[in-house]
Amino acid sequence: MSDKIIRWGIIGCGKVTEIKSGPAYQKTLGFELLAVMRRNENLLHSYAQRHNITKFSTNSDEIIHDNDIDGIYIATPPDSHKEYALKVAESGKICCIEKPMAPSYSDCIEITNAFEKKNLPLFVAYYRRSLPRFNKLKQLINHNSIGEIRHISWHLNKAANPLDLSGEYNWRTDKQIAPGGYFDDLASHGLDLFTYLLGDIENASGISTNQQNLYPAKDAITACWIHKNGITGSGSWNFGCNTREDKVEIYGSKGKLTFSVFDEFPIQLENENGIQEEFIENPENIQLYHVQNMREHLLGKLIHPSTGKSASHTAWVMDKILGRIK
């Protein structure tokens, strides 16, 4: 494995792969982005040309079963993740799935079991677990910078965007694909990060509603939870407010940490030494460290922080908050 070039194919080379993820596979030593798939032939040809991809197809099976390809990155909307992932597992290939892993916890478990049965690596693109900014937070927590952790709270506000107001179709607010609407797409990042920072969640519950009636999915959610180590948590997400706010506070016995999940604000540490701030810039290709850690995992140098198992736990928390499981 140390000398082998891992050749990747992307299923669904849409917007998320343009800058966030696709180039990360090209920049990672020991990886090669060999092939891409998209149903729209014109957009597919444009992508392949712009990113210098030698193989491309509108047929996902051609990419999945190509003997020159060792790993598949699934970057389609979540409702198709299970279908493609089960095919990848059957083909015996490495896989990375875009987040959220699937629309439901049960689908996530089915996917994870398929890869475990074949003893194949399964990664999920919760890339914040690999970003230096959030690993700095983890370091501050582990070094008791704010003492024993008591509680975490997160509030995320966003205004309705032009697509929401237009009434045009958007898979992110289709309740068949994303029952929680933008909550599924955005809150999953934060909740997954919180389990990485503070440990798995033991129980969670929530209230969700549709306040604006702009689309069929939920647009306002509140939740509370408790981690297995006794740390409590609360969150609120509203996608119909006039202002944007993204603020997380972690309260400890000796201080507080404040940061943002999405906005590039400094980490703020408040304790007996006063208030300190540190800004850590994200890479141009936000998934770069996530993808590099996949290579390190395959070399046996570390255990990747975001796997099918950890992503399934996040899906369980999401389903608990939305009341989809008891």
Image: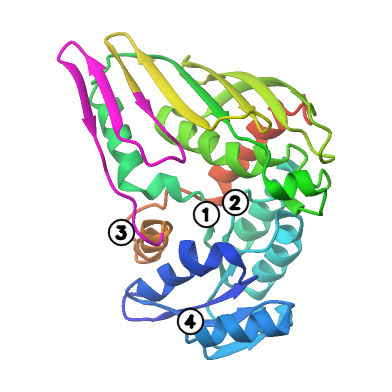
Answer left or right for 219 relative to 296.
Answer: right
> Between disc 4 and disc 1, whose residue precedes?
4
Q: Which residue lies furthest to the left in this view?
A: 273
**Location of the C terminus (image quadrant):** top right
| Dot 3 amino acid type | Lys
Q: Which residue is labeled 2 in the image?
A: 99
Residue furthest bottom in the image: 54
Residues 52 and 87: in front is 52
Q: Earlier in the sequence, mark 3 or mark 2?
A: 2
**SS assignment at label 3:** loop
Residue 194's disc number: none
Separation (CA) of disc 3 from disc 4: 29 Å
Seen from the viewer's position, the closer of residues 110 and 278 is 278
**Label 1 sits on residue:** 125
Q: Which quadrant is the N terminus positioned in?
A: bottom left
Q: Earlier in the sequence, mark 2 or mark 4?
A: 4
Residue 216 at x, y percent in the picture: 85, 40
3 and 2 marks in contact (CB < 8 Å) = no
Task: Identify the image quadrant of residue 148.
Answer: top left
Kind of element beneath mark 1 = loop
Residue 205 lies left or right of residue 286; in this view the side is right
Magenta residue span: 258-285
Compared to residue 325, the image places residue 54 above or below, namely below
Q: Work out whether residue 107 can be spotted.
A: no
In the figure, residue 244 lies in which quadrant?
Answer: top right
Do labels 3 and 1 touch, CB within 8 Å? Answer: no
Q: Which of marks 3 and 1 is nearer the N terminus?
A: 1
* Of labels 4 and 1, the one closer to you: 4
